[in-house]
Amino acid sequence: MSYGFFDDKQREYVITRPDTPLPWINYLGCEAYFGIISNTAGGYSFYKDARLRRLTRYRYNNAPFDFGGRYIYMRDNDSGRFWSPSWEPTQDKIEKYSCRHGMGYSIIGSTFERIRAETLYFVPLGENLEIWQLVVTNEGKKPRRLSVFSSVEFCLWDAQDDSTNFQRNFSTGQVEIDRGVIYHKTEYRERRNHFAYFACSEKLAGYDTQRDVFLGAYRGWDRPAAVERGRSFNSEAHGWAPIGSHHVKLSLKPGETRRVIFVLGYHENPVSGKFDPPGSQTINKRSVKPTIAKYLKPAAVDAAFESLRAYWDRLLGLYQAKTPDRHANRMVNIWNAYQCMATFNMSRSASFYESGIGRGLGFRDSTQDLLGFVHMVPERARERVLDLAATQLESGGAYHQYQPLTKRGNNDVGSNFNDDPLWLIVGVAAYLKETGDWSILDVPVPYDNKPGSESLLYEHLGRSFRYTLDRLGPHGLPLIGRADWNDCLNLNCFSDTPGESFQTTTNKEGKVAESVFIAGLFVLAARELAEIAKRRGSTSEVQTYLKAAARMEETVLAQGWDGEWFLRAYDDSGRKVGSRECDEGKIFIEPQGFCVMAGVGLGDGRARKALDSVNKMLATPHGIILQQPAYSKYYLHLGEISSYPPGYKENAGIFCHNNPWVMIAETMLGNGDRAFDYYSRINPSAREKISRIHRCEPYVYAQMIAGRDAPTYGEAKNSWLTGTAAWNYFAITQSILGIRPTYEGLVVAPVVPGSWKGFTVSRVFQGVRYDIRVSRKGKGNSVKMTVDGRSVEGNLISRPTAGITSVAVQVTLS
Ligand code: GLC
Ligand code: GLC
């Protein structure tokens, strides 16, 4: 059963029926102004921070699930019938519905009684506003007299406060209406210097700004009183719930098409110039009016849309692959890269599963996300690295997250996740390899944003390294702290009080429970750091890092090996977690993937053994399960992991984030068939045909797919904002297709399926375009190469001489 199709040429997913199993969404905006939009025009917008600067209101976990958004109503003024071209909220029997989710835009429309109405939604580059361009066509033979009503519900800025503090908020709402533009200015009278505006290109027949007047008492968005009667009330909001709605009348001859443009935006004034005239309470609109006027003109909208398309052409053009697998092509060339940019912009803050309130930019999450977007936006990646590092603590530890608007770290979802600091090394290494920008290491960066505490970014990395060594447990393995990558393996929590957060509760001292996963991550990070130190000429540090990595590797082999696979951890009583000795949770995916990625067990066959155990015990047709057997009950000493019913989330769900670790590990052992097989199992495009089971969007990865212990085995949840995006992108582009940036140049080391006859990759690396053509002559992975016609030893393409901007590479695999 399908709900749409991929239009790869347009880089769109086209949804052909509105009742998708879940809202299938897209993101608008790629700089500072953002929105999420579902296939029925649900969603909301914000400036920089989904919690602190929310422009429009959205009620999560609604019934229906997705309700509230950028709704347009159409009305036939002769028959009095009205409908929503986006299906929601009126749910009429529209025809030829389609939602085209593209790169930074969505076009949603349908036909109803011979009126085609389609709206393009997007955010122009460089602007803090969104455009809704409605195109209405009379496809019938009679002239038609129509009304158009727009609607948004304003959020009173702080989304948390907006959804809880009603005793105050019902009295604070304020608007201004000036020449048809609706200005939302709640709290502008006091400490805010920003406001929202909602404008329309056409002469208005009326407007509304008070929700309950527009809708009518006891009515919902499915039949607003103003729309039903065909005339706005010209209401002005004082308190309660400010909204914006314009009413436009259109007369259309047969075959005639009209465009109506709406602009919803955010604007800031200097504090000293908030009011006009000074001393009044009226918003100073001088600096915003030209922007509004500009985007109400069709030519400006067309030009802005063209620029947006060109922006994505450029970003996606940086890495294009042609392989025998269309699902891989589509993900690599379009959707996976696009999703990586969404995780860059949102981290884990705002999706249909992340409320925009709870989690800002995560230290661990965003450093990993770097792997997926650094080649597309290197300058912004640089800023991100420095922002993240500035939230690091002097101890070397890290706040788990920070708020994008303030860039200040907080402990809202806990602290002392002992893996956190090491990810900074992984992220910085990826940044350096991609950009060659060594100057970043010499930037003075504060700790906890405290002026005066600055040290070089390079020194921050050293602190991350020492943080682990300062916290070793009884077996010489890293102490786990609150948790490691697996937020839910809470070995020091021991919570038996309902409602306590597993991430902020600690009832044990934390001196015993150790993580084999962190050990693997440490080996990898310490070796990366040694490579960096080497290139800075710090020979003694190189030795320190390499020795520590070697010692940790020995410790893992001695204390972290269970016979057939790597252990997961030692708990607070020193008992094994993830061992054949356990009744449940005998084997976990994380240390198998990560230890092998770090090179542990490569020399003595243990890596192969561990990965074969994964294949035997964890791999399913829907992806690789996190651990088995699932925990059938709550274990006080294990924490949140055992709080989930079997098969969901960290309790034996298919956590897509760490599947690519196993793919990468398989490529390190030369097994391209298995790596690609795992890749395909969770590839959303390859799962499109089972949309009924999968339920989430077929064009982006979800955080998890229910495992085989779950009654809803195969069902995805939490799409979009997940480390799955970056890691799968990394696995397919750098490990399977094997085109990798390194300090010395681009390496070509494909580990692809034996059945592939070849593939091509066109990749820009440090300003040079490499057109790489790989053909298979034999079954193996050994590479013979010519670069611009000259044969080259090994698999490294060194930097071309200055001035050369494109290089042709022929590779044979045998
Ligand atoms: C979520 C978190 C991530 C964590 C993972 C496993 O995806 O965002 O930080 O590593 O869950 O618990
Ligand atoms: C819960 C989720 C986990 C997430 C964490 C952070 O534990 O299960 O995936 O990372 O919350 O808030």
Image (spheres, rainbow, N blue to C red):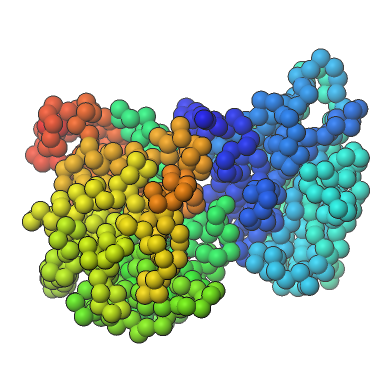
Q: Is residue 383 left or right of residue 108?
A: left
x and y percentages locating residue 157 in the rendered image: 68, 63
Residue 319 to residue 213: above or below: above
For image coordinates 39% across by 71% down, the residue present is 635
Residue 21 is at least partly visible in this image = yes
x and y percentages locating residue 369 in the rendered image: 39, 55
Residue 536 is at least partly visible in this image = no
Q: Furthest-bottom residue in view?
A: 509
772 and 499: which one is in front? 499
- Could you tell me which quadrant the C terminus lies in? top left
For image coordinates 85% across by 32% down, the residue present is 81
x and y percentages locating residue 281 in the rendered image: 83, 67
For image coordinates 19% across by 54% down, the residue present is 610
375 and 291: which one is in front? 375
Q: Is residue 767 left or right of residue 757?
A: right
For image coordinates 52% across by 64% down, the residue present is 359
Q: Furthest-top residue in view?
A: 141
Quadrant of the rendered structure where residue 584 is? bottom left
Which quadrant contains ligand 1? bottom left
791 and 641: which one is in front? 641
x and y percentages locating residue 683 in the rendered image: 38, 40
